[in-house]
Amino acid sequence: MKTQLESKDSIFYKDATALAELIRTKEISPVEVVKAHLDRISEFNPSVNAIVTVADTAMEAAKKAEAEVLRGDKLGPLHGVPFTVKDSIDTEKILTQRGSPIFKGRVPDADATSVQRMKNAGGILLAKTNLPEFSYWIESDNLLSGRSNNPWDLTRTPGGSSGGESAAIAAGMSPIGLGTDLAISVRGPAAQTGIVSLKATHGRVPMTGIWPRAPRRFWHVGPMARSIRDLSLAFSQLAGPDGLDAFSTSTVAFDAGLSQSSSRPLRIGWMVGPGFGPVDSEVVATVKAAAEALQSFGISVEPVGIPALEKDFALDVFNRLHVMEMKPAFLESTKGQPDNMLYKMAKTMLSLPDTSMVDFIDAEQAVERIRDGYAQYFQKYDALITHVLPIPAHKHGISEFVIDGQKVDATYLQGATVPLNLTGLPGISMRFGTSSEGMPINIQIVGSWLAEATILHVASLLEELSPVQGLFPEL
């Protein structure tokens, strides 16, 4: 599809921060904002299929939020701003069906911690978004709600597993939302639709109320939006322990990132391999361009390598580990219901052979070697810039790709993202280029553990320099 510059009058293409300010200053009402997004959903969701359930409480919540503004009540940072949520994340009294007929009609009794925190900030739950069955595939397709399409080109995928969320935000049906990430799932879909997303350090945002939890040590929940400032705002509201998720222990007040008092220039490396698999030349050029653009801010930038990623291919390590941990959860949930599963999703997992104990232990040790490799890297550098995906968004249903002359299967799309799930490192996905076919190309900004402040700062600088700022799909 064609692209257009953002219309300053389009409510549905303003970011969440701008909407919150307009609501706070009474230039626009929460009712107007919610209605604009509901109208947008009615008009364009039939072709994009990003939204699976509209919250029947949204307009009532908007009226309540409007009354609070008019009374002069204390307002949260997202007061009156609608948000959407991936349908694997529990929402109180709103359908959460996990992309499967097995869970058709399921209505949770309580919100996930992340959803409740968005509401505590004043956000209004607008809708639930599509996903692959059980959040397990690189395309958002399932037997319950069907396939989501990319707003830039309906013949292409918006990715998985948070593909419905990425498509909804890119299409102006939502300004901000929540996705989950096991190996690629907030960063990859953001790259395929040209929006931004944050996978924070593992444990920064509690996973309470999100399914599946196995393997818990690799799962993340994170914000997806259209601006870096929205990611920062959302992260400030989402982070911190909830007393229920034992992995979530770091308080939001603590940040090991950029020190505002530091006077030395940042040091940043960039790489597209080896260690990630083959990468398309247009993607390589975009990563290099983004890295070199930072030099205009006096930042030291140079090409780098991380030897540990060459020794242990992270995607192979991940596959040997997560099968053993995730397969039992799938077996339990799908028992006696083979006709209610898509082959590429749950059936694929169930058909994979078990990892031997020797291979499992070797994979565990490989994770430690990869963590050590990143730790050594961050002794010298403050951040790392890589690609998110080795190719731009692809056509629906493709299971094999030829990338830089090499034939690879679809799992290789996770080559540069899965290391951050194995290690728990934070990463941002943001657009910095466009392919020859007009599709977005995102880069990934990686930080050290608990250093979200650093990568959000770097991303904000790159946002200023981005050659694609203000471009959205023309539906």
Image (cartoon, rainbow, N blue to C red):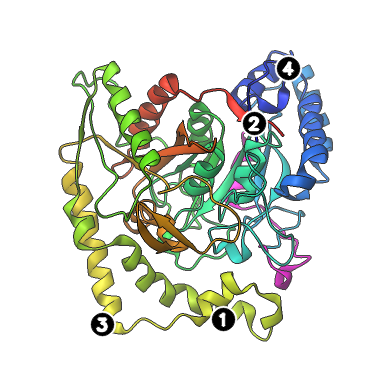
| Residue 438 place in picture, x, y as percent | 54, 35
Contact flag, marks 4 and 1 (Cβ < 8 Å): no
Question: Looking at numbered disc 3 in the image, what kind of residue is underneath it?
Answer: Val
Q: Quick one: label 4 or label 3, which is nearer the N terminus?
A: 4
Pointer 4 residue: 72
Q: Quick one: label 1 or label 2, which is nearer the N terminus?
A: 2
SS of the residue under disc 1: helix
Q: Quick one: label 4 or label 2, which is nearer the N terminus?
A: 2
Residue 246 visible (yes or no): no
Q: Residue at x 79, y 17 (%)?
A: 70
Q: Quadrant of the N terminus?
A: top right
Q: CA distance from mark 1 to mark 3?
A: 23 Å
Q: Quick one: label 2 or label 3, which is nearer the N terminus?
A: 2
Q: Quadrant of the C terminus?
A: top right
Q: Which label sits on residue 358?
A: 3
Say if 351 sits above or below 119 in the image: below
SS of the residue under disc 3: helix
The label nearer to you, 1 versus 2, is: 2
Q: Residue at x 37, y 27 (%)?
A: 457
Pointer 1 residue: 331
Pointer 2 residue: 2
Q: CA distance from mark 2 to mark 3?
A: 52 Å
Say if 428 sits above or below 111 in the image: above
Q: CA distance from mark 1 to mark 2?
A: 44 Å
Dot 2 crowding, Cα within 10 Å, few <14, some 14–19, many 20+: few
Question: Looking at numbered disc 4 in the image, what kind of residue is underneath it?
Answer: Gly
The label nearer to you, 4 versus 2, is: 2
The front one of 158 and 196 is 158
| Residue 465 place in picture, x, y as percent | 41, 20
